[in-house]
Every structure is written in C-alpha cells, then in structure tokens.
Amino acid sequence: FQNVAIKHIEQRLKRTIDMLEAQDDGIRCLAVVGGVAANKELRSRLEHICEQREDPWKMFVPPPRLCTDQGSMSAWAAIERIMVGSSDEPDNQEVHARFPFQFHE
C-alpha cells in the first residue's frame, strides 16, 4: 500500500514541478510538512525527485520529532515566521470583507 501511495504522490509532484518550471516563476523549493513528512521512504523518494531535476530543487523538511503533531508543526511554522519578521498583528493589517454580511429584518 505504501509504495502505491508514494507513487501517486510522486506522479503528482512531478507534474506540478513540470508546470512550475514551465511558468519560469523562480519557484524551486519543496516544503514537506505534517505527519506524512515523518515517513522516511516518502522523504527519500521526494528528495530523489528534487535532486534529479535539470535545475535541482531544494527540499525543506522539519525534524521528524516535529512532524507527528499538528500543534508542533503550527508552532514550528510560527517560529519560522517570527524569524523573518512576519506577523499577524491586527494593527498592521488591512482587512476588507470579500462577502459582506447583510441585515435582513
């Protein structure tokens, strides 16, 4: 089962990478996160795909100890954002309603 599941992911990833490279927008990085990122076989096979490209892609994967719990992944993502100065501080954000609520009486 695992081999078939990973083959499916590999096929979709290759198609996506081909599409992104054709767009030539400079994206050459893959982030593998969440519980599936703890799977050594998956990591290895995705790393192989990234390395085999004509212009090799960089693959980023958090340490396995952070890949088993969504709370840990969220905390890791928050640390990464803080390190680059990104913030969700409401005072610094412009918010515009896309679908405004209407009152009906």
Image (cartoon, rainbow, N blue to C red):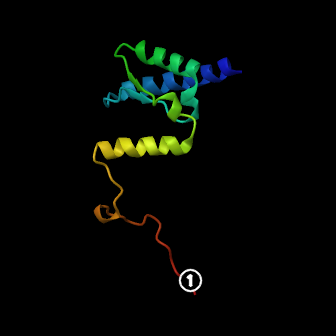
Front-most of residues 96 and 6: 6
Identify the residue at image location x=40%, y=46%. Answer: 78
Question: Residue 3: where, in percent of width, then height?
Answer: 66, 17
Identify the residue at image location x=33%, y=46%. Answer: 82
Quarter holding residue 75: top left
Question: Residue 24: where, in percent of width, then height?
Answer: 32, 27
Quarter holding residue 88: bottom left
Quarter holding residue 7: top right
Mark 1 burial class by Cα count in 10 Å: few <14, some 14-19, many 20+:
few
* Residue sticking out furthest to the right: 1
Front-most of residues 69 and 2: 69
In the picture, measured across the screen, residue 56 lies left or right of residue 105, that is: left
Question: Residue 40: where, in percent of width, then height?
Answer: 56, 20
Front-most of residues 77 and 10: 77
* Residue sticking out furthest to the bottom: 105
**Above or below 53: residue 16:** below
In the picture, measured across the screen, residue 17 lies left or right of residue 2, that is: left
Residue type at mark 1 is His
What residue is shown with label 1? Answer: 104
Q: Tell me the quadrant of the picture where the C terminus can be found.
A: bottom right
**Above or below 95: residue 45:** above
Identify the residue at image location x=46%, y=71%. Answer: 100
In the picture, measured across the screen, residue 28 lies left or right of residue 34, that is: left
Q: Tell me the quadrant of the picture where the N terminus can be found.
A: top right
Question: Residue 98: where, in percent of width, then height?
Answer: 43, 64
The count of marks equals 1
Identify the residue at image location x=56%, y=83%. Answer: 104
Query: Considering the numbered disc 1 on the image, is that residue within a helix, a strand or a loop?
Result: loop
* Residue sticking out furthest to the front: 65
